[in-house]
Every structure is written in structure tokens, then in C-alpha cells.
Image (spheres, rainbow, N blue to C red):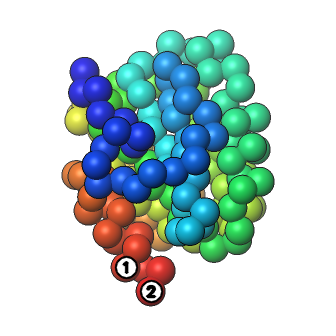
Amino acid sequence: MDSKTLNTDPSIPPQQNVVRNACYEIGYDGIRNRLYFSILGFWKNTDSVPDFLKDWDKALQLVSPGFTLLIDMRTMITHPQQLNDLHEESQRKMKAAGLSRIANVMPLDRIASLQVADSIKKIELPSQHFETCEAAQHWLDKTMA
């Protein structure tokens, strides 16, 4: 498994950690009004991520409307269908908080990549897929100007 996460990727600037656990990380950059979300590995079920929505509530208190989101899913392994509801609820919360753009660094796992693409269609927000965090960061920075 690739051990790179948002916090160690040199293309991502230092940020405030909102939460960091074995399944995901959420970081915040107040200068860019941006959240960083890393999905790490395989989540067996909802018991693996009991505080997921509460953690998103904490993160969303830090941003202002118009914020952007960089999602790093390179190490994600396909999630069971039962977790789709959690992801969709977090997306509804982000949209309600004023999310403007999403840059997705897609999973290396092919099935996970298809799963993510299907979920992203439901968000109905401008988003773009990237192979690297650096390219994703550049696209989000460019759209801020």
C-alpha cells in the first residue's frame, strides 16, 4: 500500500489537522479555504468509521462558503455498498456548507475508481479527476484566481 497521505505529500502545503485515524484524514488550509480528505485503504463497515459524519461537521465549521475540496483516494480499496450512504450524507453536508469545487485524485484500485466516479455524479458540483495531488492542487488554485 502506498504510504503517502495528504499530510506527507510534498505537493500539498502544511495544513491544520482536523482528524487523523487509520481510515481517513481531514485537513484544513485557512489561507486557501480548502479541505483535504484522504481515504485510506479498506473500510470494512460503518463500525470502522463511527465518527465519520461528526468529523465532517467539525471540518465544515472551519470553512467559509465557496470552499474547495481535494480528495486523495489513491490508497482507497473498494468500499462495501453500505458505506455509500455515509459518503452521500457527507457530500450533502459539504454542499450545504457552500462547497464550490472538488479535485479528485482517483484510486489506483480499478473497482474503487468506478465506485467513486458513480458517487461523484450524484454531487452535482464542479469536479475534476487527477492522477496526482500536485495537479489537483494546481487546478483548485487556478480556479481561485
Q: Residues within 10 Å of mark 1 (few under 14, many from 20)?
A: few
Which corner quadrant of the image does residue 41 belong to? top left
Work out which quarter of the rendered image holds the C terminus and state it.
bottom left
Direction from residue 105 to residue 23 in the image, left or right: right
- Residue 92: x and y in percent read 69, 52
Per the rendering, the mark at residue 142 is: 1
Query: Is residue 68 in view?
Result: yes
Direction from residue 127 to residue 105 in the image, left or right: left
Residue at (42% x, 28% y) in the render: 40
Q: Secondary structure at mark 1?
A: helix
Residue at (59% x, 15% y) in the render: 48
- Residue 132: x and y in percent read 24, 52
Which corner quadrant of the image does residue 129 belong to? bottom left
Residue at (49% x, 19% y) in the render: 22
Q: How many marks?
A: 2
Direction from residue 79 to residue 123 in the image, left or right: right
Q: Residues within 10 Å of mark 2 (few under 14, many from 20)?
A: few
Identify whether 42 is placed above or below 141.
Answer: above
Direction from residue 67 to residue 79 in the image, left or right: left
Which three-letter amino acid code belongs to the residue tagged 1? Lys
Asked whether 145 or 107 is in front, the reply is: 145
Q: Are marks 1 and 2 in contact (CB under 8 Å)?
A: yes
Asked whether 57 or 20 is in front, the reply is: 20
Which three-letter amino acid code belongs to the residue tagged 2? Ala
Residue at (58% x, 52% y) in the render: 28
Per the rendering, the mark at residue 145 is: 2
